[in-house]
Amino acid sequence: MPKVAAALLACAVLLGACTKVDQGPAAGGRHPWTRPGHLVIGSAGEEPDSLNKLFANTDAADQIAQFISEPLFRYGPAGEYLPAAATEVPTLANGGIAKDQHTVTLHVRRGMKWSDGAPYDGRDLVFTWKAVLNKRNNTRITAGWDDIAAMDLPDPYTVVVHLKKPYGGILGIFACGGGGYPPLPAHLLAQLPDLNHAAFNSRPISSGPFVLTAWNHGSSLEFVANPLYWRGKPGLDRISYRIVPSADTLYTLLQTHDVDIYDSVSESKIDQLPRLAGFSVTKRLIANLRRLQFNTARPQLADPRVRRAIGEAIDWDRINATIYHGYNERAATEIFPLSWAAPHGIAPMKRDLAGAARLLDAAGWTRGAGGARAKDGVPLAFTVSTTVSKPANIQAELQMAQDLQAVGVHLEAKNYQTSLLFAQTGPIYTGRYDSEFTIETQGPDPDNEALWSGKMIPPHGPNASWLNDPLLTQLSHDANLTMDRAQRRALYQRQAERIDALTPAVYLYWQNSFTAVNSDLKNWKPASYISDFWNCWEWTI
């Protein structure tokens, strides 16, 4: 990884934090447009598909979970586990993880309450484990949770987790993000036969710093401070999470000060950030990976030679440098380059038209009179799907289509709103798509068994590539059978090499996130993993 990117990760770069000359500060030295105690966050087209993490697939759901849910552990800025509902992070050193790695003891904080006043304790965690594994529930992912043989509850504040076998990613399932689920309120949900249509999924009570007061679909989600939050009343009185149709519109709202935060500004607007009045801008390499993922169950995409040829026919460097303005870090594998498990020796995909042509010829897809390739009378054509809120994504699809024409492959865009594309009944998780050009958010632990195991193909998990490779299934499983990082690193290296050979996805970039924040906001601490909202109870404005 270039040194400059590492340096950018290590610090926040302030690019613009001035006040308009013709508008002096309000009382107390604030900007005149600042709403004391009320923060407005803008989201470009991102609306949650559910507010129950068991069923949520969108990034917006991960963000909002930081407000309304208190997991056992939160992730800090560098992906470290921080005690939250649990009083400490279990380790081998402190005895929280047994020497044989088959038992984990969790100590739940005393005195916590749900926003309706009911106690929040270990009984909620035990219920959540059962809910995740309840076959009546359409749980998004059960990985890790199904490695638990039993949970003992010697008292409401002590949960002893018995594992069927050592599991390296066990703590991650108790955090908030990826396959992690915060505890659900047993007193409210335990009597239901399933949670698929529970009112809680759209009108949840809170264990976190804020309470949802309204979900105005397509417009906003409104939150107020939770007076029962265990850390005490948060620094903000209100948060408005505004859902804005497009990135361009959101930037206009930033300029007019109708929003206070634009998290991960669109690349087309980054060069304009220094001219913003009254904002601070932070930059950080984050674990958001943009890639073209294939549905390998589609007949025309089942051959790895075809998938590799598609990757080699597209000029990814040009797309990154022009459409995404060169702000992001080219990616070679799906493990974050700053992770302890980052593989080595694998290069980002480069354009090679001659190599692509040879692969397609070898796979039996030959050119016809017009140059288009076909096999047994079937043309080599497929669709690509992305979210419509970011114009750059659509421009990239057009560039891909032009590049693929050069080798006789036809590509057609078929795009969706974010909430529909990632819904459990949407095209990705039902297999009704050919390829997707989206961002995958990685967690701090490199556990990716759910993404590559043949046992995790929907509806059994989120392996939406539909790849069922026995070696990849075994490697991704074996990497979780130990907490020894050296052993896990070696297995993830082999896994990355296998993924590179099979090409179920082509990786474009890791995102350098530029975020514009009202400079009156205090205690903003951006993170590399999951969410910049991890410490939202500390914010004041």
Image (cartoon, helix red, strand yellow):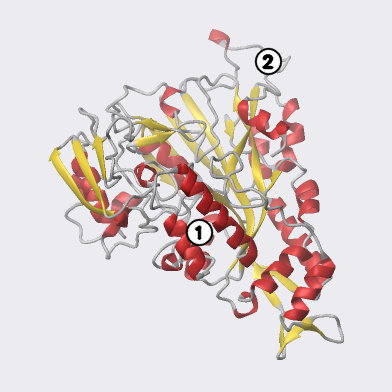
Mark drawn on residue 422: 1
Classify mark 2: residues with Cα within 10 Å, few (<14), some (14-19) or many (20+): few
Provide residue 179's location: percent of width, then percent of height: 41, 50
Of residue 61 and residue 94, the one placed in the foreground of this image is 94
At 30% from the left and 33% from the top, the residue drawn is 85
Horizontal relation, residue 182 to residue 5: left or right: left
Residue that mark 2 sits on: 23
Answer whether residue 82 is visible to the viewer in this image: yes
Name above or below for residue 30 compared with residue 224. Answer: above
Provide residue 225's location: percent of width, then percent of height: 36, 28
Classify mark 1: residues with Cα within 10 Å, few (<14), some (14-19) or many (20+): many
Mark in the foreground, 1 or 2: 1
Horizontal relation, residue 327 to residue 107: left or right: right
Of residue 228 and residue 221, the one placed in the foreground of this image is 228
| Residue 300, picture quadrant | bottom right
Q: Report if the CB atoms under discs 1 and 2 are less than 8 Å apart.
A: no
Q: Secondary structure at mark 2?
A: loop
Marks 1 and 2 sit apart, C-alpha to C-alpha, by 43 Å
